[in-house]
Amino acid sequence: MRADDRIRLRHMIEAGEAMAQFLAGRSRADLDSDRMLLFAVVRAIEVIGEAAARISEDARASAAAVPWKAIVGMRNRIIQAYWDIDTDIVWKTAAEEVPVLLPLLRSVLEEGDKA
């Protein structure tokens, strides 16, 4: 795996881990009442999506289980329609999907480090 792919995978993992810290002890209602939390979670999603968009095609192909297109699509939706963010989708992404994604990304990075 290319060095820049490993760096971007680390960025994705770090943003996902930060997101988990932001949500620790929080509820869905907190996302609506705490603007700082919403901004932090949205920013972490942006970082994950931007890094995913810059992963090489070779690395993406070798990690087909990662939903690259969906990750990048989520980032694009948040960036391009920032005024119309659905907080239910943000919560589902942050609380349900990213925790499933993190072990997968760690595995991809670990395999890439072996190669």
Image (cartoon, rainbow, N blue to C red):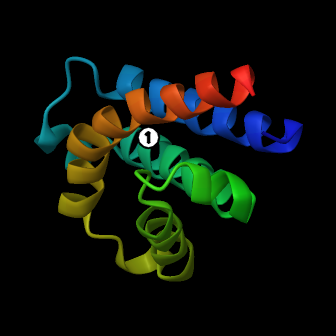
Q: Quadrant of residue 70?
A: bottom left
Q: Could you tell me which residue is drawn at 20 percent across and 17 percent down?
A: 25
Q: Quadrant of the C terminus?
A: top right
Residue 56 image point, x, y percent: 75, 59
Residue 37 image point, x, y percent: 38, 38
Q: Residue furthest front?
A: 115
- Relative to 112, is 29 above or below? below
Residue 9 image point, x, y percent: 65, 38
Give the crowd class for mark 1: few <14, some 14-19, many >=20 residues within 10 Å: few
Q: Amino acid at mark 1?
A: Met
Is 66 in front, or is 49? Answer: 66
Q: Is residue 84 left or right of residue 62?
A: left
- Relative to 74, is 61 above or below? above
Residue 54 in sight here = no
Residue 70 in sight here = yes
Q: Is residue 52 left or right of residue 114?
A: left
| Secondary structure of the residue carrying numbered label 1 | helix
Q: Which residue is mark 1?
A: 36
Q: Could you tell me which residue is drawn at 52 percent across and 44 percent down?
A: 44
Q: Is residue 42 left or right of residue 5?
A: left
Q: Is residue 112 left or right of residue 99?
A: right
Q: Quadrant of the N terminus?
A: top right
